[in-house]
Image (cartoon, rainbow, N blue to C red):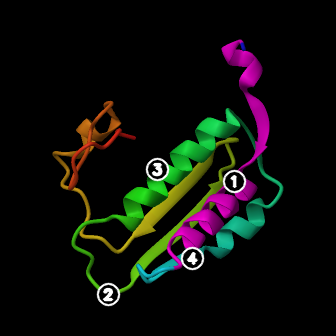
Amino acid sequence: MDEAESIQSTDLLGAVEQICREKIFQDRFGKNLQIELDDSLRSCSDLQILAHPAELRRVLSNLLNNAIEAPEIRSSQRQIRILLRNEKNSSVELMIQDNGIGIPAEVLPRLINEGGSFGKTGGSGL
């Protein structure tokens, strides 16, 4: 299939909600996971973006996995907050926050490279 042909109008909020449901189901045996969908997502309920649906799901899944696996959590409960903003300039900002200790600034540029990782071996990068 041609690269351009696989790009489709995709429901971003629907994709986010689906991946969250999958992660909560996968966690049902005990990582004490809490995912909060910020109220900002409701204002984007009809938001369609042009994306490769499978790639969008993969990226969302990887970002949530990274938040779930965040090293050295600051509390006994893993907390993830997802925010979505539909900007006036027709862009969208998706933020995934967790209560891990964070990634050192000097490591961030490496994460976009294939295999780039922090806190674990064998990562695929963002």
**Disc 4 from disc 1: Cα separation:** 15 Å
Instruction: Read off the residue under disc 4.
Output: 36
Boundaries of the magenta span: 2-28
Q: Helix, strand, or loop for circle 3?
A: helix
Question: Measured from the top left, where is residue 27 in percent x and y?
Answer: 50, 74
Q: Nearer the viewer, residue 104 or 85?
A: 104
Q: Is residue 60 left or right of residue 30?
A: right
Instruction: Give the residue type at disc 3.
Output: Asn
Say few, some or many: other residues with alpha carbon within 10 Å of mark 4 (under 14 / 14 to 19 / 20 or more). some
Instruction: Give the residue type at disc 2.
Output: Ser
Instruction: Give the residue type at disc 4.
Output: Glu
The quadrant holding residue 76 is: bottom left
**Disc 4 from disc 3: Cα separation:** 17 Å
Q: Which mark is residue 62?
A: 3
Say few, some or many: other residues with alpha carbon within 10 Å of mark 2 (under 14 / 14 to 19 / 20 or more). few
Q: Residue at x 39, y 70 (%)?
A: 98
Question: Measured from the top left, where is residue 125 in percent x and y?
Answer: 34, 39
How many discs mark residues in the rendered view?
4
Image quarter (top left, top right, bottom left or bottom right) of the N terminus: top right
Q: Residue at x 40, y 67 (%)?
A: 68
Q: Which mark is residue 76?
A: 2
Instruction: Read off the residue under disc 1.
Output: 15
The quadrant holding residue 104 is: bottom left
Instruction: Give the residue type at disc 1.
Output: Ala
